[in-house]
Amino acid sequence: MNMRFFVPQDTTALALGSNSVASMLAGELKERGLNDEIIRNGSRGMFWLEPLLEVEYGDSRLAFGPVTPSDVSSILDCLSSLEKNTKSANHPLHLGEVDEIDYLARQQRLTFSRAGVGDPLCIKNYQNLAGFTGLARAVKLESQEVVDQLKDSGLRGRGGAAFPAGIKWQTVLDTPGEQKYIVCNADEGDSGTFADRLLMEADPYQLIEGMAIAGLAVGANQGYIYLRSEYPVAHKILNQAIERATEAGFLGENICNSSSDFFLEVRLGAGAYICGEETSLLESLEGKRGMVRAKPPLPAIEGLFGKPTVVNNVLTLGAAASILEQGSETYKDFGMGRSRGTLAVQLAGNVKRGGVIELAFGVTLREVVEGFGDGTYSGRPIRAIQMGGPLGAFLPESQWDTPLDYEAFAAIKAMIGHGGIVVFDDTVDMAAQARFAMEFCAVESCGKCTPCRIGATRGVEVIDRIVKNQDRDNNLILLTDLCDTMELGSLCAMGGMTPFPVRSALTYFAEDFGGESPREN
């Protein structure tokens, strides 16, 4: 009986040896005289199981992992003895049906519903999974109707600021201009984040479709993906996907046989964290140094080359494709409060089972970290969790039952950001982490405003004096004042949010600074 084998080719799987597994599998199949197909798919996001080998056997899709080249022969031996549609294989690496793996089965996958299912560059596979349905629907709607779908869904920007995406699109639509742009912020630089990369590598047409829909919605005929320079695999896949989508009529002139054009290009980022800030990104995209612009004017009114511009991140645009495909009401059914739809949580740090987990807003931080992460990799107790990247607060155990909801996190002086979660066990030095936050800001600041440029440098020095117990009380007052100045006086979130991790470390982990026991309230 013929089988189809799926071996991931995304960055994480490659780093863990998936190419060697694929090569060994091809050799073994040839040696056995078998002509079974090998498909290089994308990861399902269960990185702790990579390389994950999936086998389509009759109506079943069996999973084995994590697989090494030396495991391939025994897996083939096991498969050769199976009966058609058998879901149980007698092999130590057998995980059962892929979709029934607990880590995956408990998710609510909308944006990532196609990730890992097939060849990410196969348009036919994408269409068989309802791909480009949203674009086909958008072509038949008026621009305002497309924007209304986005507004009705409640989608908020997944890049960190959580601004309502529909309001941004509405602003660009309402702003007069013969030339408008769609810019995708794919400069994913926050610590513990990799969902953008996974979507681009495992399901690139989802992003392409979302950007084309955005173009139709606001009257833009040109789009740019500003891609993190450290993502060579995503760069290659995106360029190939854009070429194929253009040949198939989903990009370029008269997309989907309409009277609308939409052209798309990938531009590599400048390798600077600050270029993840939308105005700095636009400066870089124009060929300038990545410096933050003063706002107003907003990019939606005067953005790329001074023209009205939609700037959204990968997951926001990917969600837009899902919304047009399934309808705003379906998307809005997920989530809580003003946080609608799903969030791509990225679990990393000192954790046993890291990966991408897509869940409806409302699940608690503890449920994600303990339920999916299965504790620390070191086996020691969790002490602190940071969410929202290097500018996110450090959360003590008393705050782990906070639901993943933008307003709930804001109430505890924290943020969800891009959805990255980094776990620390009880050996972490929180004073060192606070110092790193200031040092990171000093290194990555664009230098345009004084509170960020100078404040972060002074912050490192003040923390060093506190840890050394030099004039401790006065330096604690000075650090508090410095954080206030950075938060209220910085031009962008780089300096404005650096105080979040510093203040939380001081508040809840004071003993690491030589102070009293932590305050857990």
Image: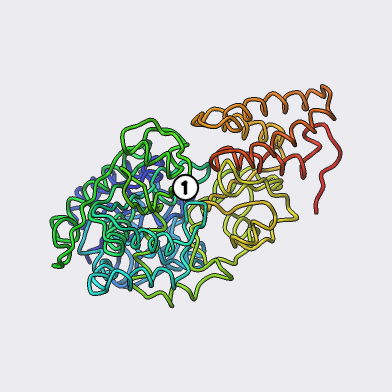
Mark 1, Cα crowd under 10 Å, few <14 / some 14-19 / many 20+, is few
**Quarter of the image that includes the C terminus:** bottom right
Residue at 61%, 26% in the rendered image: 454
Q: Is residue 388 left or right of residue 46?
A: right
User: Does 333 appear above or below 402?
Assistant: below
> Can you identify the residue that label 1 sits on?
296
Q: Is 229 or 499 nearer to us in this picture?
A: 499
Q: Residue 46 in the image: x percent, y percent?
A: 46, 54
Count of numbered badges drawn on the protein: 1
Q: Quadrant of residue 139?
A: bottom left
**Quarter of the image that includes the N terminus:** bottom left
User: Does 424 appear above or below 315?
Assistant: above
Secondary structure at badge 1 equals loop
Q: Residue 226 in the image: x percent, y percent?
A: 34, 43
Q: Residue 271 in the image: x percent, y percent?
A: 40, 33
User: Does 118 appear above or below 294?
Assistant: below
Residue at 50%, 31% in the rendered image: 448
Amino acid carrying label 1: it is: Pro
Query: How are the colours assigned in the image?
Result: rainbow
Residue at the front extreme of this rendering: 176
Q: Residue 144 in the image: x percent, y percent?
A: 33, 71
Q: Is 347 or 484 nearer to us in this picture?
A: 484
Q: Quadrant of residue 427?
A: top right
Residue at 69%, 57% in the rendered image: 400
Residue at 34%, 54% in the rendered image: 202
Q: Is residue 277 left or right of residue 408?
A: left
